[in-house]
Image: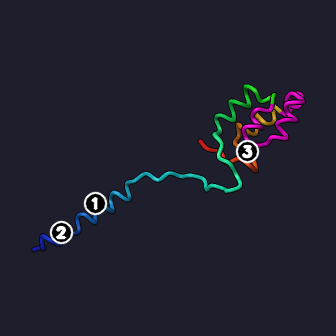
Amino acid sequence: MANPQTTQTQQPAQTQQQVQTNQPTQTQQPIDPNKKPKKWIIALLLSILVGSLGVDRFYMGYIVSGIFKLITLGGFGIWWLIDLILIATKYDFKKVQWVD
């Protein structure tokens, strides 16, 4: 016969192990200290709505290129379209860590 104390001590350990394995694991990208976390959907909406004024570049932390994009009205539409495609495909910018 099994000792009742042995089964009682094993049961909490099994329950604790089950709890640890049943916890959902979140897959997150490692955070780069040189990049600032930015929400992808906000950058995409800014690029669609006011990207020709450089607001998407300002949001991502590219102030100088945002000013040039503002002055040229989105690089006469070409720069706006390129940025729209880059942001929509979650391009890996040097200063941006995309967050969902």
Q: Name which quarter of the figure residue 39 lies in.
A: top right
Return the disc, 1 or 2, that comes first in the chain's sequence: 2
Q: What x and y, as percent, mark residue 41?
A: 64, 35
Q: Are marks 1 and 3 in contact (CB under 8 Å)?
A: no
Residue 66 in magenta stretch: yes
Q: What secondary structure is the magenta-colored segment mainly?
A: helix
Q: Determine whether, in the image, residue 93 is placed left or right of residue 64.
A: left
Return the disc, 1 or 3, that comes first in the chain's sequence: 1
Q: What x and y, as percent, mark residue 46?
A: 71, 30
Q: Name which quarter of the figure residue 12 lies in.
A: bottom left
Whole-angstrom CA distance, mark 1 to mark 2, is: 12 Å
Q: Residues within 10 Å of mark 2 (few under 14, many from 20)?
A: few
Q: Are marks 1 and 2 in contact (CB under 8 Å)?
A: no
Comparing 50 with 5, the one in front is 50
Report the residue at 76% width, 50% height from top: 94
**Which residue in the structure is indicated by mark 2?**
7
**Which residue in the structure is indicated by mark 3?**
91
Q: Determine whether, in the image, residue 100 is placed left or right of residue 6.
A: right
For label 2, the SS is: helix
Q: Amino acid at mark 2?
A: Thr
Q: Amino acid at mark 3?
A: Tyr
Whole-angstrom CA distance, mark 1 to mark 3, is: 44 Å
Q: Residues within 10 Å of mark 1 (few under 14, many from 20)?
A: few
**Which residue in the structure is indicated by mark 1?**
15
Q: Determine whether, in the image, residue 40 is placed left or right of residue 63.
A: left
Report the residue at 85% width, 30% height from top: 70
Q: What x and y, as percent, mark residue 30?
A: 61, 56
Q: Which mark is residue 35?
A: none
Q: What x and y, as percent, mark residue 98?
A: 65, 45
Q: Amino acid at mark 1?
A: Thr
Give the extent of the magenta segment. Answer: 54-79
